[in-house]
Image: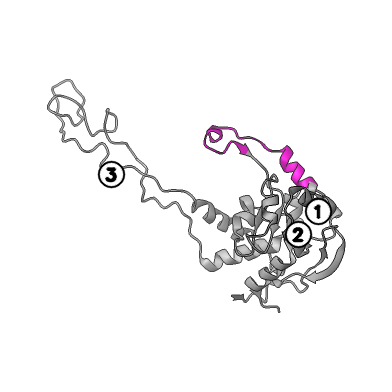
Amino acid sequence: MTVRYTSLILNEIPKAPIYDLEANIVNEITLPAVFGLPIRIDLIRRAVHSALTARIQPKGRDPLAGKRRCGESWGIGHGLARVPRLDNGRAVLAPNVVGGRRQFAPSPLRKIHEEINRKEMRLALMSAIAALANKYFVSKRCRISLDKLKSIPLIIIDDFENLTRTREVKNVLMKLGVWEEVLFAKERTRIRAGKGKMRGRRYITPKSLLIIVSSTKSAVINAIRNLPGIDYATPQTLNILTLAPGGQPGRLALITVKALNSISEMYKVEKP
């Protein structure tokens, strides 16, 4: 699908060096045109809101809950409240009695999901991809100094996808100068406040690196899935919650060359 945003694209698409596993520059590549799109914060936050509300399961009460008793008020002169009662004097139906209906009960018909247009979501996704190459937005999320990095996002050769040991991935990240980001996520991992700690959400871990590989069958996925704060994705599984957690774009990303080519094919943008 080609998107026509010729008036919005920057005149100069950024370039990035390609690193090998020893952090040596072996080539240089021009990033896909999608990285030149302007970053629409309003669209990104709207898309994040839509994605978060889509996860919420609707809930409600039975419409007849508390209304299955036939009672009527006895009227005045009995020294009792004028609420519906059974023949034995038990109050029913009213919200303030035992077994009565609930006042203003939640309804399963309530609209929870904030819907968004398909093309609007796609533009928000492309805008979040463009933020991966914007130093201003990356510096707001990243805890390390970007002066140490020659370019963002970091582009690495496809041999990175063949790594099978976490130790090997750690060595590559240390040579690239981004291992401190993972260490920060480890140090800031903490126990959640509140009842969520009893419901399978005991720990909070900050987001660190985003690693984009070409396939979900890449061997490196098993090596990185236990590193704190690191998310992995493919060009086919990229979503707005991965690219811009909390509605704030600009994650520090590591992309393989093959995955970058797939992004270029999937998100085509006409150049001016």
Relative to residue 178, is residue 124 drawn left or right? Answer: left
Residue type at numbered disc 3: Pro
For numbered disc 3, what is the local secondary structure? loop
Mark seen at residue 61: none
Estimate how packed mark 1 is, as few (under 14), some (14 to 19) or many (20 or more) residues with alpha carbons within 10 Å.
Answer: some
Relative to residue 26, is residue 79 drawn left or right? Answer: left
Residue 217, percent across and down? 63, 60
Separation of residues labelled 1 and 3 (CA atoms): 59 Å
Residue 87, percent across and down? 12, 27
Q: Which badge, 3 or 2, is on the more N-terminal residue?
A: 3
Separation of residues labelled 2 and 1 (CA atoms): 9 Å
- Camera-side residue of 122 and 260: 260
Residue 14, percent across and down? 78, 68
Mark seen at residue 63: 3
Judging by the rendered image, the residue that carries numbered circle 1 is 172
For numbered disc 2, what is the local secondary structure? helix
Residue 187, can we see it?
yes
Q: Which badge, 1 or 3, is on the more N-terminal residue?
A: 3
Mark seen at residue 160: 2
Residue 189 colored in magenta in the image: yes
- Camera-side residue of 265 and 122: 265
Residue type at numbered disc 1: Val
Quadrant showing the N terminus: bottom right
Say which of marks 3 and 2 sits in front: 2
Residue drawn at the location 68% of the way across and 44% of the way down:
206
Range drawn in magenta: 180-203
